[in-house]
Amino acid sequence: MSIPFDGIPLLDQVTMFKEMEDLGYSDLWSAESNGTDGFTPLALASQVVPTMHLGTAVIPAFTRGPGLMAMSVATLAELAPGRFSFGIGSSSNIIVDNWNSVPFDEPYRKVRDMVRFLKVALTGEKVDHVFDTFSVRGFRLARPLPVQPQILVGALRPGMLHLAAKEADGAVINWLSAEDVKQVVREIGPGKEVVARIFVCPSKDAELVRKLGRLAIAAYLNVPVYAAFHRWLGRTLELEPMWEAWEAGDRKGAARLIPDSVVDSLIVHGSPDKCREHILRYVENGVTVPIIGLLPFSIDTKTAISELAPRG
């Protein structure tokens, strides 16, 4: 499950984390954009759910310096030894440049350099190296880790997917259909972790889900990296009218131009059993860790968590 949940105070979610552990959920994953930071909710969870795996999907490579990034990752790994996965990605020009005033330059090289740095720094070795996108002089973690965390790369298109396969333990993927997973997995290759954030709304009100889902899809798929991703996936014909309207400044009109078929592919909705079956199709096509990103479209969060709990 993706945490934290919208509209519920963070401290009030401690009980929910415990209930999810009892319900059979295996993992809690956080993200980072403009809500909580990506580490604090997991630090909180690490102390109340001792059996659950924790992960970030994803932390931007640009918004922390290398040393601080290593310390943040190491702290979580120390709190949850052997059960923490660190997902790092380029994020987007919106989050990096517009919101954090950091130039969104050379995202592929930035992520690659951070992965290479962390793989050394987290072992406790001294790092004194000039990377392509930054330099580190004499950094050494004062608290080296006995158990190294898994490192994953947030990836959309072939370049980052190949980076995830070559230099990391796997990839984190996002905003794609179960059928799209096949295309992505071909680029990653065998033997790697494939973590997917899957947006889910267990509601039978298909009209409402499609209405609100269009707004969420338009907000994401007009970000340049996601637009390029869906062109690569083959959705140019379906989404070009939406992209043109958005570019012309017609945001509401753009959302209305997203076909039902696209919403139904990218957002899992329907009865809880139907949602569960749809999520399993992602797994059948190559996802090893399916993360539910709960969309609270006129549903009760706690009820949805209970209804979507794993079976068996």
Image (cartoon, grey):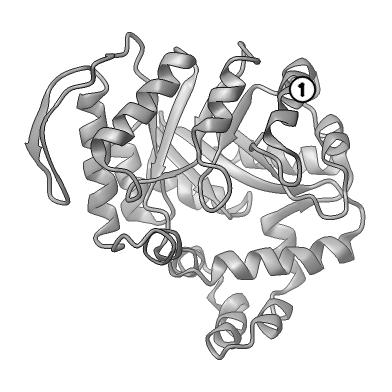
* Residue 262 seen in the figure: no
Q: Nearer the viewer, residue 254 or 266?
A: 254
Image coordinates of residue 228 in percent, x first then y, are 44, 68
Count of numbered circles in the view? 1
Examine the image and state in which quarter residue 121 appears: top left
What amino acid does circle 1 point to?
A: Thr
Q: Nearer the viewer, residue 191 or 257?
A: 257
Residue at screen point 27% across, 37% down: 115
Residue extending furthest toward the right: 204
Image coordinates of residue 66 in percent, x first then y, are 25, 38
Q: Is residue 227 left or right of residue 124?
A: right
Q: Identify the residue under disc 1.
A: 15
Q: Nearer the viewer, residue 160 or 22?
A: 22
Residue extending furthest toward the bottom: 248
Residue at screen point 53% across, 72% down: 222
Residue at screen point 72% across, 69% down: 214
Which structural element holds mark 1? Answer: helix
Image coordinates of residue 155 in percent, x first then y, are 41, 49
